Amino acid sequence: MKTLLVGVGGMTNGGKSTLSMSLHQQIPNSCLIAQDSYFKDDSVVPVDSNGFKQYDTLDALHMDTMMCEVASWRRDPLSFMRQRALNPEHTASSADEEVYVLIVEGFLIFNHRPLNELFYKRYFMEIPYDVCKTRRSSRVYTPPDPPGYFDGHVWPMYLKARQEIESMVSGIVFLDGLKPKEELLAAVCKDVCQEIERLREKDFYLFPF
């Protein structure tokens, strides 16, 4: 069987979760892992000199646990899907010929080098500062954002993370999060499906009979 890892990163409230979920629904034999599922307990997240919880850092995440999940999928995508009550779209006889896709979504997935190195396709959702701030203020978080948190922590940490990936990561497709969701999904889905077909054709030409 063939495997393909796709990363969908980007800023907070940029639309990455919506795109990832829609992509998962469109791509056969796909799984979705979200980085937000691996936040550490609030009690152990450090506080900076301004009293802001440092959530927008890799240290606030159980990246070791997340990497174990990714490794589990890479070892056996079929078992991984069955354990999560997902139904692979193939017959038993064609399992070895299928391409399995893991979509990993999160705001710092490209900043964690061991994870970033696994991606074959990388997409980064971005929106302007004012739109991001407005969207962030309309959502309810647990714990809630304290006054000044966006400008004092969230946005500066995003800029830092963005600068970091620009210096260490290549092959990222930057997406305009203000475009219609359907347009973004169609473009990314087409790109991923073309790669799936390329992987299938590679096997065909190596073993045509």
Image (cartoon, helix red, strand yellow):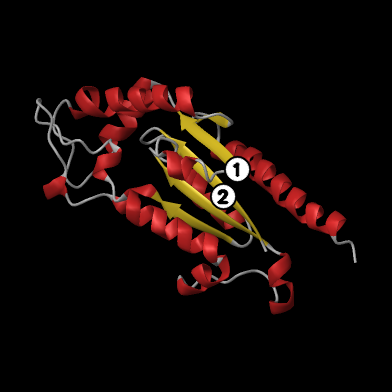
Amino acid type at image mark 1: Tyr
Which residue is drawn at the image coordinates 47% and 63% (left, top)? 72
**For residue 187, what is the image quadrant?**
top right
Amino acid type at image mark 2: Leu
Locate residue 108 relative to residue 144 in the image: left or right.
right
Which residue is drawn at the image coordinates 73% and 72% (left, top)? 94
**For residue 92, what is the image quadrant?**
bottom right
Which residue is drawn at the image coordinates 29% and 27% (left, top)? 157
Q: Position of residue 91 (x, y in %)?
A: 70, 76
Eyeballing the image, is 78 above or below 14? below
- Asked if one can make out residue 17 in the rendered structure from this viewpoint, the answer is no
* Residue under numbered circle 2: 5
Q: Residues within 10 Å of mark 1 (few under 14, many from 20)?
A: some
* Residue under numbered circle 1: 120
Eyeballing the image, is 145 above or below 2? above
Pointer 2 or 1: first along the chain: 2
- Give the SS element for disc 1: loop
**For residue 109, what is the image quadrant?**
top left
- Asked if one can make out residue 1 in the rendered structure from this viewpoint, the answer is yes
